[in-house]
Amino acid sequence: MIVGAQWGDEGKGKVTDLLAERADSIVRFQGGNNAGHTIIRGNETFKLHLVPSGILHPGKTCIIGNGVVIDPGVLISELDELRRRNVDTIGLKVSANAHLIMPYHLLLDSEGEAKLGELKIGTTKRGIGPCYADKAARLGIRVQDMLDETILRKKIMTAMEPKRQELRPFARDPMLDLHTMTEAYMTFGHRLEPHIADTAALVWNDLQAGKEVVFEGAQGALLDIDHGTYPFVTSSNPVAGAACVGAGVGPTAIDEVWGIAKAYTTRVGSGPFPSELDDDIGDRIRDTGGEFGTTTGRPRRIGWLDLVALRYASRINGLTGLCITKLDVLSGIETLRIATGYRTDDGAEFKDFPYHQSVLHHAQADYVDLPGWQEDISGARSLEDLPQNCRDYLNFISDSLGVPIVLIGVGPERSQVILSGDRAAELA
Ligand code: IMP
């Protein structure tokens, strides 16, 4: 299982892409098109939001599990774009139980943010929160509903009813017309029908047959609705435990959990960020690392690596391995800081991630300073190729977490990785 160990955008797509090569199926289990994966292959760049990145490997089953929320228009555009670029999409399977993002979810997301004003969450405005809210309220429309016009119409009517007041300003929006919406979603249903399946059964069959299944998380632990920096979180559970629910497998099926973290920290949207950098070094990392959102294009907030948050993410995910990405971005910085604790104005110190939101909002990071390296490391393919300072930086992280580093990213290309440890050696 691949999960984000920070606030998302850790480079999960690249790691999944590497693992997908030898896996039989790749499964997404939560989130929706708020996620964005960029995969670089030679001089081709693929930006995927919903389709699991394994689709680029022919012959794989790529599953969008029941825990994902799907904007069917976006999914179909992605399939069209992949087909245009000669990628075979026959292996894509979509859970009949996954929930659908409806036009009113998009409007409610934007409206909700506008109403919050300064307190806004900074959502991706893709309708994610309102869709999961309807799921919990049992007013959701599911993928299988697109296959029956009578049911679809009735369910849309029922779901719209309690939203009448909030949707009043959009009463004339043609997309909210019941007939138009039903027609549009029936058309999506026809297009997607060959892909719709009982995906939990597909995963079960693969596991029974001893095949390798990769679960691909979206977002990251600190954006988890239960364990993240609530309310500045997404509306799903990006932590490893959620894969069981969102894909329909038991916890005994999972044998490895790899957490992905950048060599520094980024965050998009609002919310606390104790190791945030608001200076030239932050700007430099943003520019060198191309830290602009794949989904929204927003500049990402930048900070030093935060070991307090990373230790927390490691604990709640039960990480068995750690992948450190974008290490090359730090080359040339004289002194690198790593947050090892938090401190509040009244002098209270925290070595562990504080549970109280107010503490986190006022926390300043305490740092350990390590010497940087000047060398270009983008050509390194083994730990021995890395400068000593760079290895010290990595050792500091894995010692602090008690989790081995299994993969290190030193550039955007899929070949620009260093694999370490037994399991990783199998992938080489
Ligand atoms: P939502 O998921 O669109 O509701 O947004 C809620 C919060 O999660 C916002 O702070 C978003 O910026 C953040 N978020 C959602 N998806 C991603 C992602 O893929 N990467 C980074 N942040 C994300």
Image: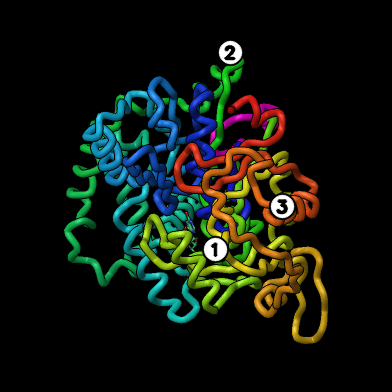
Which numbered disc, 3 or 1, marks the residue closer to the eye?
A: 3
Identify the coloring: rainbow
User: Which quadrant would residue 358 be assigned to in this image?
Assistant: bottom right
Q: Which residue is mark 2?
A: 209
Residue at the spot x=77%, y=77% of the render? Answer: 343
Q: Which residue is mark 3?
A: 388
Of residues 29 and 82, which is closer to you in this image? 82
- Horizontal and vertical percent position of residue 10: 54, 52
**Disc number for residue 266:** 1
C-alpha gap between disc 3 and disc 2: 44 Å
Prevailing secondary structure of the magenta residues: helix
Q: Of helix, strand and loop, which one carries label 1?
A: strand
Mark 2, other Cα within 10 Å: few <14 / some 14–19 / many ≥20: few
* Mark earlier in primary sequence (3, 2): 2
Q: Amino acid at mark 1?
A: Thr
Query: Element under label 2?
Result: loop
Q: Tell me where the magenta segment starts and ends, as one range.
A: 243-254
Label 1 Cα crowd, 10 Å radius (few <14 / some 14-19 / many 20+): many
Count every numbered label the image shows and give the total.
3
Are the residues at dot 3 and dot 1 in contact (C-beta closer than 8 Å)?
Answer: no
The residue located at (25%, 29%) in the rendering is 86
Q: Is residue 56 above or below residue 99?
A: above
Residue 390 x, y percent position in the rendering: 67, 54
